[in-house]
Amino acid sequence: MDDVERAADRIATRVAEGLPIVCFTGAGISQESGIPTFRGESGLWAERDPELVATAEALERDPEAVWRFHEELRAMCREADPNAAHMALAWMETAVAERAPAPVITQNIDGLHQAAGSSNVIELHGNAGRVRCTACEFVSEDLPERFDRLPPLCECGAILRPDVVWFGEQLPRQAMEDAQRWSRLAGVMLIVGTSATVQPAASLPVMAFRSGAVLIEVNPEATALSAVVDVSLRGPAGEVMPELVEELSSELAD
Ligand code: NAD
């Protein structure tokens, strides 16, 4: 049995038991859609200091610079299409739906899981295509392609900000509670395209492991989790995930 077969076999066994197949994804799954990861040589932070463009302090100090960076990121996310890995996860949700839930917990802010058709997506770090007011309760996803002026303002007069989690900020409470609940219930956690170093999100695979989940990792490189996972599938998610779901579909049909 090769590693893909072994991973598919583990998933099929847990599906048969009715246990959740929880997917935990990071920037790597969107790399083949043309959105760079944050770390590494071609990463977004290779040329920029996050302190200057992705913190609440930066927004206060230089809102225009923060928004110029964010508008670049927002356009990149809007123009990207889901790749074969996003599609494979959406397919898997449908394929197992009658027997087991398959939620996606993502650290990504690009909305590509929803674009691929995944229906149960928990966004831990917000969404680049949404804004909220820094003063009142206003939140909106109905945004122009480009704002006429930066920073954009709320009707109340205060500055709007991207509805994403910046460095040093808390994760949205409801999203984190949902993610923790699924991590404790998981029969399998499929960890795709994340270095698993950004806390507190990185604590979720550990929580799943301690609750008895089988961990399967999809990543071209070894990560902090590689030593504890059951199966490591080394390769780009856009190649590995379709192979995995194809194998899973024949296992489920048996
Ligand atoms: P990371 O940048 O720390 O790590 C990315 C991981 O993806 C690495 O382990 C790398 O080996 C792996 N990878 C690279 N190419 C891959 C591929 N083709 N297939 C599978 N894996 C691949 O990313 P992270 O762990 O997600 O954490 C970074 C933070 O940055 C997150 O909090 C996230 O919010 C944010 N982020 C989001 C996006 C996005 O929305 N697309 C993009 C960049 C960063």
Image (spheres, helix red, strand yellow):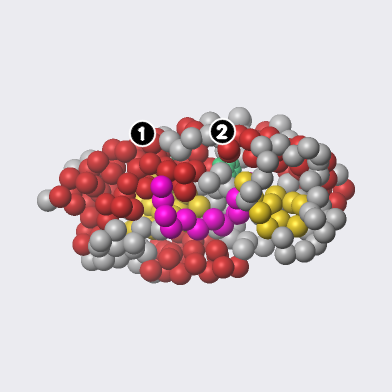
Q: Position of residue 186 (x, y in %)?
A: 37, 64
In the depicted structure, whether residue 68 falls above or below residue 176: above
Span of residues in magenta: 117-128
Label 2 – label 1 distance at C-alpha: 22 Å
Q: Which residue is mark 1?
A: 239
Q: Position of residue 161 (x, y in %)?
A: 74, 51
Q: Nearer the viewer, mark 2 or mark 1?
A: 2
Look at 58% across and 60% down and name the residue there. Answer: 200
Q: Position of residue 21 (x, y in %)?
A: 34, 58
The answer to which quarter of the image holds residue 238 is: top left
**Ligand 1 shown in quarter:** top right
Look at 19% across and 52% down and name the residue there. Answer: 252
Q: Does 190 sit left or right of 126 as displayed?
A: left
Classify mark 2 as within 8 Å of ligand 1 or not, answering yes or no. Answer: no
The answer to which quarter of the image holds residue 49 is: top right
In the depicted structure, whether residue 233 falls above or below residue 190: above
Q: Which residue is mark 2?
A: 79
